[in-house]
Image (spheres, helix red, strand yellow):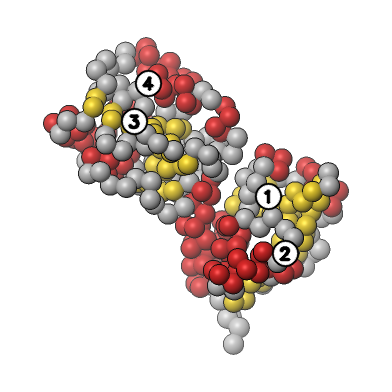
Amino acid sequence: MSPVDSLDTLLDRAVSEGASVGEAVPSELELARARRDVPMPRELAAIYTRADGLAFPHVELFDLDDFADVNGDETLFAQLPGVVFVGSDGADGFFLMDPEETLGCGHGTVFWADRGILEPDACRLAAPSLADFLAGAMDDDAMNAGREVGEISLDQLAQAISARPDAVVAYPGFGEVGAMLAARKLDLPISFGLSDFYARFDGLYLHDMGLRIFGLNELGAIVGDGETVALWFGKDKTGRRYGLTIGGWRGFPANRLFVVQNESEIGTAATLGRFTDVLRAWIESSPRRDAAP
């Protein structure tokens, strides 16, 4: 069964079970205009050919007008470029899809995000597909209680480290409470995601790159205009230095990795991505070597 076929079945079920369904189905022209302005996922477009929005007890799928209004608000995309907002929980959260895979969990996945914390790593997994999302909404599942994207990425890094002892040395972390207490002693803006990393690992060493990821107490401040704007996070065998963004600096989310040869490059350095994703990719792509005894 294709995603669209399964959505048709779910829509039939929604109607039969009394879900609130928008009465006026959008015209082909209205739908074409909406799709021109926003990269609407195919599955979502299929729903609008049947209904102008859906409402369940704790989930509202936007009607086409609300879809256009919300996705036309550029302020919502400051740290979430490329996502598409598809609905609301009727309270503090939006549901969104990620057709450009900027969050790293697949283009069809549905996420929940707190309207006051529209940051990529804080988005929570709601369902692996729009069909699963609607099925959960009909069953009155808690669609805003999934794991955060940053947590999922950290787990994937830990799995890569465990699978490649030949490629990386991982130093034991502080534990969750210990990392928070140690971070408080530093006069540095350390995010919850970075604290979670140090709860598991107090630094890494990647053999192939000669890259040393600093332990928590080795982190250093990168100062701009009298305040800490980023953190020194590591150094490799060529002398290149690795930094981590602090949320909002140069418009970047927190915990994005960048590399510079010298400090004069900091203001223009491009970010490589979420540090846990980048480190995992480097570890997984490292040449095989005999594991250390």
Callout 4 environment at 10 Å: few (<14), some (14 to 19), or many (20+)? many
Q: In the rendered image of this protein, does residue 237 appear above or below residue 52?
A: below
Query: Which kind of residue does numbered mark 4 sit on?
Result: Leu
Is residue 12 at all visible to an observer of this figure? no
Sequence order check: which comes first, mark 4 or mark 1?
Answer: 4
Q: Which residue is outermost to the bottom?
A: 293
Sequence order check: which comes first, mark 2 or mark 1?
Answer: 2
Q: Can you identify the residue that label 1 sits on?
A: 246
Q: Can you identify the residue that label 2 sits on?
A: 186
Is residue 162 at all visible to an observer of this figure? yes
Q: Can you identify the residue that label 3 sits on?
A: 61
Q: Quadrant of residue 42?
A: top left
Q: In the rendered image of this protein, does residue 258 appear above or below residue 200?
A: above
Q: What residue is shown at x 31% (from left), y 38% (from top)? A: 58
- Per the model, the C-alpha gap separating discs 2 and 4 is 48 Å
Query: Which kind of residue does numbered mark 1 sit on?
Result: Ile
SS class, disc 1: loop
Sequence order check: which comes first, mark 3 or mark 1?
Answer: 3
Q: Can you identify the residue that label 4 sits on?
A: 64
Q: What residue is shown at x 46% (from left), y 21% (from top)? A: 69
Sequence order check: which comes first, mark 2 or mark 4?
Answer: 4
Identify the image quadrant of the N terminus: top left
Query: Which kind of residue does numbered mark 3 sit on?
Result: Leu
Q: Position of residue 104 (x, y in %)?
A: 49, 48
Q: Quadrant of residue 282?
A: bottom right
Callout 1 environment at 10 Å: few (<14), some (14 to 19), or many (20+)? many
Q: Determine which of the numbered discs, if any, sits on residue 148 in the image.
A: none
**In front of the other: label 3 or label 2?**
2
